[in-house]
Image: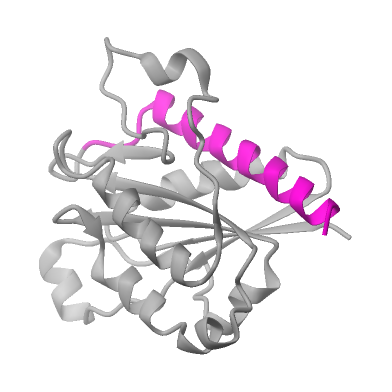
Amino acid sequence: MATKVYIVYYSTYGHVEKLAEQIKKGAESVEGVEAKLWQVPETLSDEVLGKLGAPPKSDVPVITPRELAEADGLLFGFPTRYGTMAAQFKAFIDSTGSQWRTQELAGKPAGLFYSTGSQGGGQETTPLTAITQLVHHGMIFVPIGYTFGAGMFEMEKVRGGSPYGAGTYAGDGSRQPSELELDLAFHQGKYFAGISKKLKGTA
């Protein structure tokens, strides 16, 4: 049977969604792996989103907590809010009480990716604080470390991401993920899918 990797994310302006799409491509490049994109529910009204200038949501399906257990591996993505995950994603995690009680996500590999507004906006604190959510579910955190190679040491170009996972800088919203950031996202998807496949094979 194929290894299922679910890429679950929240994206206000599309930056995290672009990373998610590349992560999916990377995961699907691994033989025997099926990857699927999911969005978490929006908590803001259309009126508020309109005032924020947020674009319409894509047609990626909205996930419910019970579907998490279907996956062999889970990658979670979100923008930062004051150095931690956005409230929309936290609200979704807070709705997984049933999965926590049964520990049905325990032992599943999980990874993180994210977007921040600036270089000091939480490229490390956002994933670091998110790890607590994984711990309470008994999940296995899979960072990318420095497996991306030379790209992790790029000093001439602005690059989001860290050993925790792929990332991008949104700036005022007009900046889009760079080619290097998208390459890192692809790498994370491929690397994570390989780990998930190995873990499933030994189960």
Question: Residue 64, position in %: x, y?
Answer: 52, 82
- Which residue is at a point 13% across and 64% down the rendered structure image? 52
- Which residue is at a point 60% across and 86% down the rendered structure image? 102
- Which residue is at a point 15% across and 38% down the rendered structure image? 118
35 over 19 or under it: above or below:
below
Q: So how many labels did they put on this image?
A: 0
Q: Is residue 26 toward the left or the right of residue 168 in the image? A: right
Report the magenta stretch's main SS. Answer: helix
Regarding residue 15, the answer to whether it shows in the image is no
Question: Residue 115, position in %: x, y?
Answer: 30, 46
| Way the structure is coloured | one colour
Q: Nearer the viewer, residue 12 or 165?
A: 165
147 over 93 or under it: above or below:
above
State which region is magenta. 175-203
Q: Nearer the viewer, residue 9 or 57?
A: 9
2 over 178 or under it: above or below:
below
14 over 49 or under it: above or below:
above
Regarding residue 48, the answer to whether it shows in the image is yes
Quadrant including the N terminus: bottom right
- Which residue is at a point 22% across and 62% down the rendered structure image? 54
Residue closest to the far top: 156
Q: Nearer the viewer, residue 61 or 6?
A: 6
Question: Residue 57, position in %: x, y?
Answer: 37, 67
Residue 34 position by quadrant: bottom right
Question: Residue 145, position in %: x, y?
Answer: 48, 31
Q: Is residue 125 toward the left or the right of residue 11 in the image? A: left
Specify whether residue 42 is painted magenta.
Answer: no
Specify whether residue 195 is painted magenta.
Answer: yes
Quadrant including the C terminus: bottom right
Residue closest to the far right: 1
